[in-house]
Image (cartoon, helix red, strand yellow):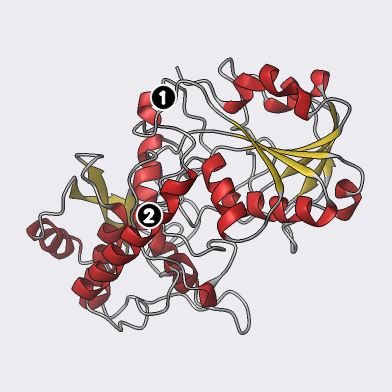
């Protein structure tokens, strides 16, 4: 079994000795015995504040639910919300502490918001002259494979803040190091490394139990399909929220289900098959409506190319359905959500055909692979 960063805390206690600490975490911040990082740090450090990202400190909230500060029932420590208008640690915490710690499991995808909760925290520690400590965890879709287009900063947002690709192939600690150096955050950053981890491991190989990092990523398999189907969040298609298989299912009342599956199967995409499904979401898009859909079935995790698979699915569905729409911006003068998810506007604008988009993805993938190798902490 891989020892997570928090399992190695005893070797790094000097980072916390005599210091006031705050911790950014959620329900995924646990050790191998399922003990919360909160409960581990409280008796051995001067832990004075907790900071919670989207979904709450114990993972009790659905996506997009805002919340105010409150006291954690178990530890009795005050919890400050990071899922608010600023999404940054508040001044009252940063002025009081010496060390800000971070322990959250990510999912290996650029558009997962916990990455930017971390980077905003790094920026705050730089601004206030504090130390930041990252407890490292595995990349659940492995630390080798890279795929995607590099985000255009014109489409910068909380679902894509830095010019990286969708599948970045780094652990959360390695990614923090990349952010810190490549994008000149220059925080006083310390990584508490894992033990017995190698980069070719996906989550299945770590020997660890999966703790769903958010309500709609219930399994390690979902982390793979999320890289493909998250783009449908920017459309009027359901991405399976409100079903038992979010992101595995996509669909809508209007989908020409069999035709799309037949077209996808003709392409012989590596590592993936598609099957027809019917579902009725209990919340989110098309709530209470019967949707004709398809399930993304991964047959080979090593050969599956989720990002380009998602782009191909979206392209086929758009071209074959006049009912298909991209969602409008969430705010006045904002960018369409699809542009924020894909990191560009050319996919929405239909500027390139799918083969040209494949070329862009291949070029950006190779470019990012060279950059990310500089930040490997594990073999």
Instruction: Please provide percent x and percent y for residue 308.
Output: 27, 60
In the image, taking residue 72 as reference, residue 155 lies left or right, namely left
Residue at the front extreme, as displayed:
374
Label 2 neighbourhood size at 10 Å, few (<14), some (14-19), many (20+)? few
Residue tagged 2: 370
- Mark 2 falls on what kind of element? helix
| Vertical placement of residue 73 versus 56, above or below | above
In the image, taking residue 31 as reference, residue 293 lies left or right, namely left
- Report the residue at 47% width, 51% height from top: 282
Q: Quadrant of residue 298?
A: top left
- Mark 1 falls on what kind of element? helix
- Report the residue at 68% width, 54% height from top: 186
Could you say which is closer to the camera, residue 118 or residue 174?
A: 174
Could you say which is closer to the camera, residue 303 or residue 212?
A: 303
- Report the residue at 30% width, 53% height from top: 306
Q: Are marks 2 and 1 in contact (CB under 8 Å)?
A: no
| Vertical placement of residue 123 versus 302, above or below | below
| Vertical placement of residue 103 versus 346, above or below | above
Q: Which mark is nearer the camera, 2 or 1? A: 2
In 3D space, how far apart are the residues under numbered discs 2 and 1 (Cα atoms)? 26 Å
Label 1 neighbourhood size at 10 Å, few (<14), some (14-19), many (20+)? some
Residue tagged 1: 206
In the image, taking residue 227 as reference, residue 173 lies left or right, namely right
Asked whether residue 41 appears in the rendered view, the answer is yes
Instruction: Please provide percent x and percent y for residue 159.
Output: 54, 61
Asked whether residue 317 appears in the rendered view, the answer is no
Disc sitting over residue 340 in the figure: none
Instruction: Please provide percent x and percent y for residue 256.
Output: 20, 66
- Report the residue at 87% width, 31% height from top: 19
Q: Quadrant of residue 299?
A: top left
Q: Quadrant of the C terminus?
A: top left
Instruction: Please provide percent x and percent y for residue 321.
Output: 25, 76
């Amino acid at each position: 079994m891989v020892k997570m960063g928090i399992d190695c805390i005893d070797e790094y206690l000097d980072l916390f000795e005599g210091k006031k600490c705050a911790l950014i975490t959620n329900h995924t911040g646990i050790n191998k015995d399922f003990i919360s990082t909160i409960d581990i740090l409280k008796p051995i450090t001067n832990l004075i504040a907790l900071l919670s990202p989207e979904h709450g400190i114990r993972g009790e909230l659905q996506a997009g639910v805002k919340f105010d500060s409150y006291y954690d029932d178990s530890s009795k420590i005050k919890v400050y919300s990071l899922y608010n208008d600023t999404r940054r640690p508040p001044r009252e915490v940063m002025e009081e502490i010496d060390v800000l710690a971070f322990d959250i499991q990510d999912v290996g995808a650029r558009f997962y918001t916990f990455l930017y909760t971390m980077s905003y925290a790094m920026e705050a520690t730089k601004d206030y002259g504090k130390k930041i400590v990252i407890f490292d965890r595995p990349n659940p879709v492995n630390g080798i494979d890279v795929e995607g287009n590099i985000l255009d900063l014109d489409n910068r947002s909380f679902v894509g803040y830095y010019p990286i690709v969708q599948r970045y192939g780094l652990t959360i600690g390695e990614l923090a190091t990349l952010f810190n150096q490549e994008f000149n955050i220059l925080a006083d950053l310390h990584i508490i490394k894992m033990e017995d981890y190698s980069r070719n491991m996906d989550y299945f190989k770590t020997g660890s139990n999966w703790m769903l990092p958010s309500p709609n990523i219930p399994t390690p398999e979902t982390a793979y399909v999320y890289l493909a189907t998250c783009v449908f969040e920017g459309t009027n298609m359901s991405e399976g929220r409100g079903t038992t298989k979010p992101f595995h299912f996509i669909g809508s009342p209007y989908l020409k289900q069999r035709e799309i599956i037949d077209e996808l199967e003709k392409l012989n995409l590596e590592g993936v098959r598609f099957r027809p499904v019917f579902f009725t979401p209990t919340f989110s898009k098309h709530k209470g409506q019967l949707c004709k859909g398809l399930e993304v079935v991964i047959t080979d995790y090593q050969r599956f190319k989720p990002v380009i698979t998602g782009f191909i699915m979206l392209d086929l569905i758009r071209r074959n359905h006049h009912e298909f729409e991209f969602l409008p911006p969430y705010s006045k003068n904002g960018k369409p959500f699809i542009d924020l998810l894909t990191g560009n506007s050319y996919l929405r604008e239909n500027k390139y055909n799918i083969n040209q988009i494949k070329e862009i993805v291949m070029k950006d993938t190779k470019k990012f692979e060279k950059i990310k190798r500089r930040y490997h902490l594990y073999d």
